Amino acid sequence: MEYVMPILMGSVLLYGLMRKVAVFDAFVAGAKEGMKILYDIAPTLIALIVGVSMLKSSGVMGAFCELLSPLCEKIGFPKELLPMTLLRPVSGGSSTALLSDVLKNYGPDSFIGRCASVIAGSTETTFYAISVYFSAVNIKKIRHTLFASLMADFTAAVLGVLSVNLFFSQ
């Protein structure tokens, strides 16, 4: 397994040399282009990180979860998964930390642990993906993409819980 990267790099170099490509020059040109893209998307990423930090530290996320808890209980959605489900479209790292907490507290084979795993695997970091990919190609109008993506995340969370309930109920 430790030989995969050296073999891959050697293959790329060999292929470039066989095609008479200036491999190092092509690498440098690609690195320059990558830095330009990073420069373009950095403000968006910084704003996203600041926004997530503000949501978590201000208590808005906790208040929103408390507001939605009665509705979740009525439809059978575990209220313990609300913070992770709400944070998942915004921040992959934060939602993964919450997933880890859920698995540690309830166990991976519990109903809540299974639901959390399915939700984590079937939802997307919507705001991150849209901000990175759309700002990289200078797309400003994201309204329809954002709505469709958030609806897909919502659907994945609800159907994830229903699927676990259907297939793993004993």
Image (spheres, rainbow, N blue to C red):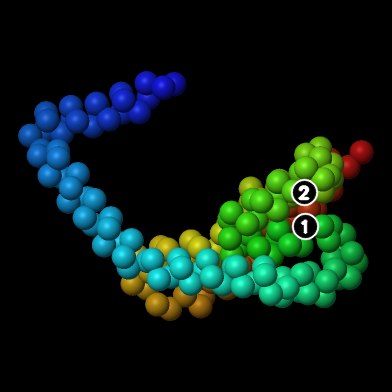
Q: Quadrant of the C terminus?
A: top right
- The spot of residue 151 in percent (x, y) is 63, 67
Q: Does the residue at mark 2 contact the one at mark 1 (Cβ under 8 Å)?
A: yes
- SS type, badge 1: helix
Answer above or below: position of 115 versus 107: below
The part of the image, by quadrant, that contains residue 73 is bottom right
Q: Which residue appears at 17% of the width and 51% of the height?
A: 29
Q: Amino acid at mark 2?
A: Val
Viewed as shown, does residue 170 lie left or right of 118?
A: right
Circle 2 is placed at which residue position? 102
Circle 1 is placed at which residue position? 81
- The spot of residue 31 in percent (x, y) is 24, 51
Q: Rounded to the nearest whole Å, what is the CA distance between mark 2 and mark 1?
A: 8 Å
Answer above or below: position of 3 versus 122: above
Answer above or below: position of 63 versus 80: below
- SS type, badge 2: helix
Q: Amino acid at mark 1?
A: Leu
